[in-house]
Amino acid sequence: MSAPTITTPGSRSSVRLSLIIATYNRADYLPRTLNSLTNQSLGSELFEIIVVNNNSTDHTAEVCRSFAEAQPELNFTMVTEIRQGLSHARNCGINHAKGDYFAIIDDDELVNRDFLKSYYDFFGMYPTAAACGGVVTPLYEFPVPAWLSRYAERPIAGTFYYGEKIVPFPKHTYPGGGNMGIRRTAIERYGMFNPELGRTGNSPMGGEEKDLFARLRAGGEEIYYVPGAIIYHIIPEQKLTPEYFDRLTRMIGKSERVRTRNLGTATYLKRLFSEGIKWGGTFVLALGYTVQGEPIKGRYLIKMRWNISRGLLGLIR
């Protein structure tokens, strides 16, 4: 169950794009995210901002109230979703959205000035495209540790850059959950986010966006990379600890087990086979880092693969 709790005035009759932000106890980060949306190049009458407060116990509601009062010209709504979990929260945002297109970001990100316009223009220029995703650039609050290679950075920061042209996403590659766009008709046809997957509270369980995009791909839908939609993902110190990395990579494996088993035995066995291939690539990369004099990066890649494999095999509870 959910209900609007804070909203700015306006009919929203001209809204075409709905930006959805799920949040849980990130009141110290959320103002930066919201403030980055106040100077968008897309006309404010064409978009709305929906913040889904997922049972936050901090001052998230007050942050949203202050933002609504300071920006009455924006179409802004905060709703509360009492069912805990990122998938529940995003689905709640979709249910409240008025637009034909949805853009989804996280509560610890900043967006560029042309972010919403890039997605809005894309969906107009590519009427057969079901979904899209943009650039994800990490914004580190502290120096990165010596063990963080670009391969280990991906699960932490979601880093993604694929050039300066709009192109189809490469095979087996999907937009990250912190920067994606999807057409309303695609959600109506393929369904919303799976509540079995995705973060719940402070648990870094994931896989909900991959599950959704896999359904779109299986249906033959087009998914594109949109370089003009850029987010800067704020990475705090606690996400750069070995303990967090261990927990995150274990949950990646666990999420993959749930996702692929839901699709059937054949899909799960195929994923196990691909995991074996990834082990080969991991050893090659680890050897390369060792030769380059950075063996710690290689060790953490092996640790990452080990944790994912254990989760995939159901060895983590």
Image (cartoon, rainbow, N blue to C red):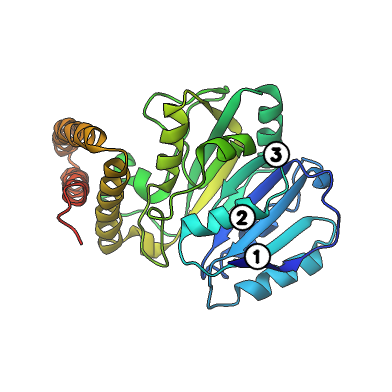
Q: Position of residue 265 (x, y in %)?
A: 22, 37
Residue 148 makes an appearance in the image: no
> In the rendered view of the protein, which quadrant contains the N terminus?
bottom right
Give the crowd class for mark 1: few <14, some 14-19, many >=20 residues within 10 Å: many
Secondary-structure class at tag 3: loop
Sequence order check: which comes first, mark 1 or mark 3?
1
Image position of 54 with respect to 50: above or below = below
Measure the C-alpha gap from mark 1 to mark 3: 19 Å
Relative horizontal placement of residue 278, taking residue 166 as reference (left or right) = left
**Which comes before the other along the chain, label 1 or label 2?**
1
Pointer 2 residue: 93
* Residue type (three-letter) at the residue carrying disc 3: Asp
Residue 201 locus on image (x, y percent) = 42, 67
Residue 105's x, y, as percent?
Answer: 56, 49
**Residue at the spot 61% in from the left edge and 55% down from the top edge:** 93
User: Does residue 10 appear in this view?
Assistant: yes
Q: Amino acid at mark 2?
A: Gly
Alpha carbon distance from label 1 to label 2: 8 Å
Quadrant of the frame with the C terminus:
bottom left
Q: Are dots 1 and 2 in contact, CB under 8 Å?
A: yes
- The answer to the question of whether label 3 and label 2 lie on touching residues, with beta carbons closer than 8 A, is no
Mark 3 neighbour density, 10 Å: few (under 14) some (14–19) many (20 or more): some
Q: Which residue is mark 1?
A: 79
Give the residue pinned by disc 3: 100
